[in-house]
Image: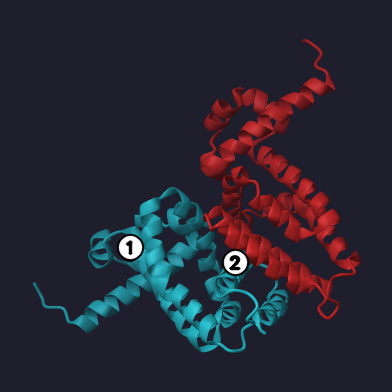
Chain colours: A cyan, B red
């Protein structure tokens, strides 16, 4: 058996994740069958699941990567900026449509819910820390409530984005949101 | 063939809609198969589709009824109050989970999208009118932007509700929303 370097392993994981992301975006979580994932990645199911265990883990690896990237933006510039970034990357909008499907899965599949929440922790924590440390935030509403507010807007924003709402309207709406969390 | 009174017809439609609502809430739009709708309503597919044409029309009849009821609340008390009502009717939360599934359908099924939008017109119009006529609203942001803002919050709120977010957090969050659209 040939020895494969860590760099090569990372490269293969990367390739699979990029292709799988497009496949999930196009077909949804359920619709992205193993056969479709094979076709999209150009790899056999054996190769895919060698790297990711199962389809759910592959999906959650992508979710996790998103959450980490978003957490970074949050700690520098806040959650509203994460939404502005989404607005400016239309190629991601199809991917966000999978989120709608996941909501039902979260309700009906407790194991998946536990795993999903684990992958979101990094983002939740970043939002919380940002709200606690940012002196521009209003002080008359508890931080948890502001967090729930911003997360609710994020969910709605993703839904609107996936539904094809015009970008300029969403952009103007984000200014209202930003204003409303500031002191 | 026996003559059936309008009252009797209305009663049968009512029965089918109530049972179908529970069935859609439990199984989702796709998951609520014709067989499951038969079981839930206690009627044959012939009887169901005599009243509603097809499954999509049955679903949209329920959506339409919701939109009309919500439009009434909006014109009296605003969209935030519609959300408060949702919060206080936990039995409806499962139904709202179907909304997530519908978002993907709206993107991928243009005919369905047209029909869906028709059923939402009454609500959109009520929100618009309320924002235009209510003197408590802030005047420094265009009405369309406030409308997009409130609709975005509504989408996020439905998602959070369906995902099991604690009611007291959502309640407190709604106060922030209400404040932020007022002058």
Residue at image position (80%, 72%) is B182
Q: Residue visible at 78% across and 23% down? A: B9
Query: Looking at the image, is A109 positioned above or below residue A86?
Result: above
Earlier residue among tags 2 and 1 = 1
Residue B150 is situated, as x and y percent measured from the top left of the image, at: 73, 66
Q: Could one spot residue A77 in this view of the protein?
A: yes
Q: Chain of mark 1?
A: A
Along the line of sight, the residue nearer the viewer: A183 or B148: A183
Which numbered marker is on residue A57?
1
* Pointer 2 chain: A
Q: Residues within 10 Å of mark 2 (few under 14, many from 20)?
A: many
Q: Position of residue A179 (x, y in %)?
A: 69, 82
The residue sitting at the left extreme is: A1
Image quadrant assignment for residue B28: top right
Q: Secondary structure at mark 2?
A: helix
In 3D space, how far apart are the residues under numbered discs 2 and 1 (Cα atoms)? 26 Å
Residue visible at 83% across and 23% down in the picture: B6
């Amino acid at each position: 058996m040939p020895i494969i370097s860590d760099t090569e392993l990372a490269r293969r994981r990367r390739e699979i994740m990029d292709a799988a992301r497009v496949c999930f975006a196009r077909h949804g979580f359920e619709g992205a069958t193993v056969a479709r994932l094979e076709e999209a990645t150009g790899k056999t199911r054996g190769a895919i699941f060698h790297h990711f265990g199962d389809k759910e883990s592959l999906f959650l690896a992508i979710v996790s990567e998103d959450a980490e990237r978003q957490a970074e933006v949050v700690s520098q510039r806040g959650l509203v900026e994460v939404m502005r970034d989404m607005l400016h990357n239309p190629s991601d909008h199809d991917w966000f449509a999978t989120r709608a499907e996941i909501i039902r899965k979260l309700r009906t599949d407790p194991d998946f819910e536990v795993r999903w929440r684990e992958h979101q922790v990094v983002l939740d924590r970043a939002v919380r820390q940002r709200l606690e440390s940012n002196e521009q935030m209003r002080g008359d509403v508890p931080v948890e409530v502001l967090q729930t507010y911003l997360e609710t807007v994020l969910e709605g924003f993703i839904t609107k984005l996936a539904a094809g709402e015009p970008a300029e309207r969403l952009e103007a709406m984000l200014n209202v949101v930003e204003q409303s969390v500031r002191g």
